[in-house]
Image (spheres, rainbow, N blue to C red):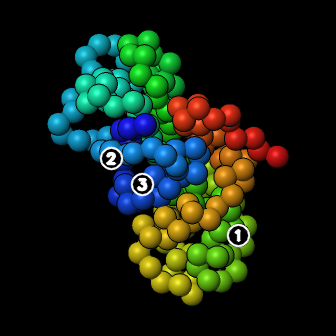
Amino acid sequence: MNVLVVSEGKHEQAGALETLLRRLGGDQATFALDRVSSNSIHAFHGKGGGYFKRALRWLLEAEKRGLDALVLLIDQDGQNDRSEQIRDAQDSSLSQLPRAMGVAIRTFDAWMLADEKALSEVLGCVVARQAEPETIRDPKRVCAGLLTNGQNQMAQREMYVRIAHRLDVVVLVSRCPSGFRPFAERVRRVFGHEPCVAE
């Protein structure tokens, strides 16, 4: 299965998102990466908000490239209407192409804070359970602080890749119910798997 994966930041693009997709059932997939803000893609014309129209345009782009599915992930960044726009794009009948669209609350970085066991293993020190990830105002800064205080030094993007390899997906589903849970369910459907169930 050839999948177009569209996301925003360098941390997603550096391998952490791809790792999560493989762990959600895409271990046999081939991924082509692109950025939501790519200048070569112009928003779809018609009614709806900017992210809704951009998501539809990426859906058509994946179809045009002859790919089998689209995965699109953006950050909420405190703008609550983004979730509604992406949900509407997910449900759009404009294309029959399988897709998994999602919004990370507040940002993708929050997902890296869900599993303190994975954080401890990656950073080489005991990391306490963090606040509910989706409520953290600036999760990227929190991740940077944990990295600075950790025993194992690496680039933050590498930290995210290592966490994505180790984290417990069920814990992530449970601790990020507004963003990760619906995204994970859509991803697993695209790859023909049952949804993850939080215990």
- SS at circle 1: helix
Q: Are the residues tagged 2 and 3 within 8 Å (C-beta)?
A: no
**Number of residues whose C-alpha sits closer than 10 Å to that of mark 1, classed few (under 14), some (14–19) or many (20 or more):** some
Looking at the rendered structure, the kind of residue marked 1 is Lys
Residue 34: percent from left, percent from top:
30, 45
**Which mark lies nearer to you, 1 or 2?**
2
Looking at the rendered structure, the kind of residue marked 3 is Glu
Residue 33: mark: 2
Residue 78: percent from left, percent from top:
49, 43
Query: Which comes sooner in the sequence, label 1 or label 2?
Result: 2
| Residue at x-position 63% and y-position 35% | 193
Residue 4: percent from left, percent from top:
36, 38
Residue 12: mark: 3
Measured along the vertical axis of the image, is residue 97 above or below residue 184?
above
Measured along the vertical axis of the image, is residue 151 above or below residue 189?
below
Q: Is residue 108 left or right of residue 193?
A: left
**Structural distance between the alpha carbons of marks 1 and 2:** 29 Å
Q: Is residue 141 left or right of residue 34?
A: right
